[in-house]
Image (spheres, grey):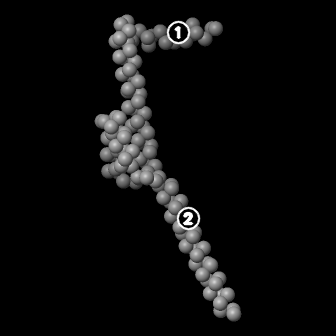
Amino acid sequence: MNALPALQKLLEPWILLLADDPLLRAMQIGLVCIGVLVIFTVFYVTRDILLRSQSFLLMFFSILLAAFFPLGGFLLYLLIRPSRTLAEKETDRKVSEMYAALGKDQKSKKSDAKKEK
């Protein structure tokens, strides 16, 4: 029960920034929500492209695309981004090396077995 008055005191200076007209207040809140969404998409694209590429040009272009064209740029980024992260590529490379080494070991064991016969 005591939390509500404390919350009202905390929010009171911020509520004064909003307009008294309900329509204008709704527009202000909508603009704040759009701003938060734009910032989120730019941070998401930045984090994602850093995990997927080492190309500075692709990183720069992707971040600018998301910053200047928030919704369309983000959707376009999803189309042009690399399909796998750098960690996934490295894991696939190591697995391929392990399979190649395993295949060589099996071939050498088979050739040793043939030599013994």
Instruction: Residue under label 1, please give it.
Output: 8
Quadrant of the rendering where the N terminus is positioned: top right
* Residue 6 pos. (x, y %): 57, 10
Residue 23 in picture, x, y percent from top left: 35, 11
Question: Closer to the camera, 114 or 61?
Answer: 114
Q: Estimate how packed mark 1 is, as few (under 14), some (14 to 19) or many (20 or more) residues with alpha carbons within 10 Å.
A: few
Whether residue 106 can be seen here: yes
In the rendered structure, which disc, 1 or 2, sits on the residue that comes first in sequence? 1
Mark 2 lies on residue: 95
The number of numbered badges drawn on the structure is 2
Instruction: Decide: is 105 above or below 2.
Output: below
Horizontal relation, residue 90 to residue 25: left or right: right
Residue 92: where, in percent of width, then height? 52, 61
Residue 32's disc is none
Count residues near mark 2 (Cα–Cα under 10 Å), then give few for <14, some for 14-19, many for 20+.
few
Horizontal placement of 111 versus 36: left or right?
A: right
Residue type at mark 1 is Gln
At horizontal 38% and vertical 12% (from top left) the residue drawn is: 25
Q: Residue at x 37, y 6 (%)?
A: 20
